[in-house]
Image (tube, grey):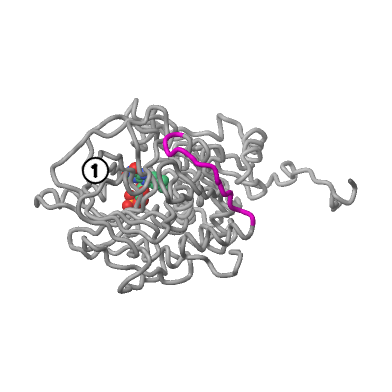
Amino acid sequence: MGGKGVNPVTMRGLLDDWENRGLLYRVKREVDPRYELGAIINAKNGAQPFLFEKIKGYQSSLAAGLGGDRELLADSIGISPSDFVPKIIDSIVNPIKTTLKETGPVHENVVTGKFDLLDLFPIPTFHADDSGAYYVSGILVVKDLSGRKRYTSIRRMQYLGGNRTNILITSPELQEQYAQFEKLGEPMEVAVMFGVVPAVVLSSQISTHLYHTDKLDVAGALLGQSLDVVKCKTIDLEVLSDAEIVLEGRMLPHEREMEGPFGELAGYYGFRSPQPVVEFSAVTFRDNAINQTIFPSSYEERLPMALVREATLFSTVRQVVPSIKAVHIPMGGVARYHAVIQIEKKTEGDGKQAALAAFASDKDLKHVVVVNDDVDIFDSEDVEWAVATRVQADNDVFIVPGGKGSPLESSHNLRGVTAKMGIDATYPLGQEEMFKRTSVPFEINLEDYL
Ligand SMILES: Cc1cc2nc3c(=O)[nH]c(=O)nc-3n(C[C@H](O)[C@H](O)[C@H](O)COP(=O)(O)O)c2cc1C
């Protein structure tokens, strides 16, 4: 549970809470945003909350690693780590609407007119071969052409100099919406929020085309209260009133600049390609703003993606295997290519059926392992043990060639399609005695003996 029993809805509140409980690392030494910052965050895989007090060349502090650890992310929304799936599903079904306020802390400082983004706040450079400095963690707010559908996501933005970046959009839905504006020769307005709690990052990863929910409302439900928003100063969008920093701008029609290479989710460099350009018209920020970043491909990028995928996967597989107990999309499978599914096996065939349902639910999945409910699916060694002791490859492994795959996946890109491999690591029904795990019938507390 959150330390005070109430979930902090501001990043400052969360940092205070974690610092009071000894969970935050404070870095007092000056850190260079070019490589050094990333090296420190990456040393803990994006799973350790850091507050950097001094970034070279800037007055502002910077937070990172807030949402890369399952237990801490659960703590930030006041649940236990085993409750993510029901909590996410419930928050999508029962969102809590944002509350529009006249003004808020994010408007304590407003910069408009001519400015250079780099003069205001640092933009980190992460990997050896990256093409330059990138915003990686900003929560993008957009509305569709009708102005009725508002939603958030995260899209990396390469600094192009002055008040311009480009933006990489891989989701068909946002690509399509931008294309509609472009067809009319109109810019698409965007706001980018930095300095938010992990629940806002988590909800931004919910699939727009699956749920059509306002993801800020879902974040409110995750946190158990309505989040305050304010109208932007130069565009017709709303942003969280407690965000630390907001960039307001427009994706320009018919303008592209080269983007990449950049170190992506799977640990490879993405190709160089022309991408849309964003021109910013305002930067607003709180007094003593605390900047925020995420190390690309670290757990902090992977975990929110994995958690929302787990929720979708669980609901889909449950439709055909109602005795499903839990799902895990592990970090090692890049938070999208591997899944482990735990079932209480009721009928022969449940194992393969669960794997088939998983592949139908998510085109990105490549390898799915199904295990009985005596296996800890969050312990990769225990899953490997089940594969080692309960699988005969000729019977229990099936391969579907030529399926659809993730555009981010290198071997898929090479061949154009992806094979799907299901491993049924459940034991045959009726053989509970044969597959009973050994145990020692004596409860001890080791410390009593040392
Ligand atoms: C840290 C982080 C960085 C991301 N960077 C990008 C990106 O550069 N481009 C992109 O299209 N998606 C990126 N994503 C994934 C999208 O944010 C994700 O697909 C989206 O929020 C899901 O909603 P959608 O259905 O609206 O795409 C990133 C996700 C995270 C957590």
Residue 329 relative to residue 176: left or right:
right
Residue at image mark 1: 162
| Quadrant where the N terminus is found in the figure | bottom right
Question: What x and y, as percent, mark residue 406?
Answer: 36, 38
Closer-to-camera residue (25/31): 31
Q: Amino acid at mark 1?
A: Gly
Rendered residue at 29%/60% (across/down): 110
Residue 389 relative to residue 65: left or right:
right
Residue range (magenta)? 22-35
Q: From this viewpoint, is residue 209 visible?
A: no
Residue 51 relative to residue 391: left or right:
left
Question: What x and y, as percent, mark residue 289?
Answer: 41, 57
Residue 274 relative to residue 201: left or right:
left
Rendered residue at 27%/43% (across/down): 167
Closer-to-camera residue (94/236): 236
Closer-to-camera residue (8/183): 8
Q: From this viewpoint, is residue 407 visible?
A: yes
- Please determine whether, in this image, residue 298 is positioned above or below residue 115: above
Question: What x and y, as percent, mark residue 203?
Answer: 41, 57
